[in-house]
Image (tube, rainbow, N blue to C red):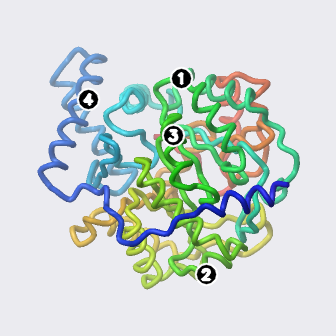
Amino acid sequence: MRIMEAQNLAANSEIDQLPQPSPIIVNKASLRTLKRKVFLQLFRILNQKTRNPIKSMLLLDQFKKKYQSIFGETMLSKASKVDNRFYFRLGSPGFPSTASKRVHQNEISRLLSPGSNYGLRTLFIAITKQCPLDCEHCFEWDNLNKMDQLSTSDIIRIVHEYQNYGTTQIMFSGGEPMMRKNDLYKILDKALPGTDFWIITSGLGLTLETAQVLKKHGLTGVMVSLDHHKAEKHNQFRGNKNAYKWATEAVMNSNKAGLVTTLSLCAAREFVNEGNFSGYMNLAKDLGVTFVQILEPRAAGRYKGLDVKLGDKELEILDHIYLTYNSSSKFREYPIVNSLGYHQRKVGCFGGGNRFFYIDTDGDAHICPYCTEKTVSVLQNTPEEVIGKMAEKSCHVFEKSVV
């Protein structure tokens, strides 16, 4: 039944031509104007807290330096514009919005009171175990295609609780979240204002009509997994001859619907070289995405027990790609690159409720999707209790972040 449904979802794909229009802001004056507006919002929040304009200006400068120390680039070195909102970090909601103001308030509170938790940037919720693919790296491999445990009402309750806790971005994953497309409509309809919502998908069934309906119900963006710029390589990685077609068409359909689009790449060891990244980034640019996310493989899920960790040489290439594509004028028209590993190696892990955490398909909290140890049930504990219990744990790769 589920496999037949997957085949039906894939049947109504559309083929478009590249290149697609790019959302990246290339006009320097427009980017400067955006910077002034963002910094003005930050200044006003600081001044509301300090009641001292001079101190607020000094703290704003400190905030910018903190940002650069974490991410290795100046704040707002690149940005995109989608549906009259601006996006400059994958883990941040669009500006201007209630969510963007909230995340700035949360970060300024952390700046003024180091070591304290103020809301979440991102909550990942796996809403289904169902998936028709056979992905090489799947971190939910042991749970795939078993009976789903989270009801639609369970997910709505979780969403509401964590919105009230101060979460500014929620990403729905799986399995393949499009297998619960109709439930997604209901969840988005019941959501409170003040949060950006995304789905993390293979692209299965994401037709133009479906993308438009998701947008109408309140979806902000779509993160599409694409693990190679060559179709045959991606199809092999995903274990399905249609995977590349689904992914690329999903991106183009989502762009047309006014959704923010991201390509997510699991950078396996054999992929990591300058030539592959050049080909991948050229494709990302032609597809018109805002972000490219680079994930480093972890020995979890289907990779458990395998030697997949990247070496120093590969990590040096990843860091170079991240910094160069985000900072060099040569790549000004290219998508913004997000690399969790870059800042995790510098300042530690933001998971475990520091800035984000992961809820699995049973409703149990994990420090991140790759930390397979269940920590606590989110259905039986308040957000404050869940965050408190996760604080007792640590990431299996990186130190806890203290910034």
- Total count of labels: 4
**Residue found at x 84% / y 57%:** 142
Q: Which residue is mark 3?
A: 219
- Residue to which mark 2 is pinned: 233
Q: Residue at x 29, y 57 (%)?
A: 24
Label 1: which secondary element? loop
* Disc 3/disc 2 C-alpha distance (Å): 30 Å
Q: Position of residue 254 (x, y in %)?
A: 47, 53
Give the left or right position of residue 134, taking residue 78 as reference. right
Q: Pick the residue in front: 179 or 321.
A: 179
Q: Which residue is mark 4?
A: 41
**What separation in Å lies between label 2 and label 4 (alpha carbons)?**
45 Å
Q: Residues within 10 Å of mark 4 (few under 14, many from 20)?
A: some
- Looking at the rendered structure, the secondary structure element under dot 4 is helix
Most foreground residue, 16 or 304: 16
First of labels 1, 2 by sequence position: 1
Give the CA distance from mark 4 to mark 3.
24 Å
Is the Cβ of the residue at disc 3 closer than 8 Å to that at disc 2?
Answer: no
Q: Give the label, 1 or 3, closer to the camera.
A: 3
Instruction: Pick whichever of labels 2 and 4 is earlier in the sequence.
Output: 4
Q: Are marks 2 and 4 in contact (CB under 8 Å)?
A: no
Q: Which residue is mark 1?
A: 192
From this view, report whether residue 299 is shown above or below residue 33: below
Task: Please name the amino acid that badge 2 sits on.
Answer: Lys
The residue drawn where x is 77% and y is 61% is 301
Residue 370 quadrant: bottom right
Q: Position of residue 84 (x, y in %)?
A: 30, 40
Of tags 4 and 3, the one toward the viewer is: 3
Crowding near pointer 2: few (<14 within 10 Å), some, many (20+)?
Answer: some
Q: Which amino acid type corresponds to the residue marked 3 in the rendered image?
A: Leu
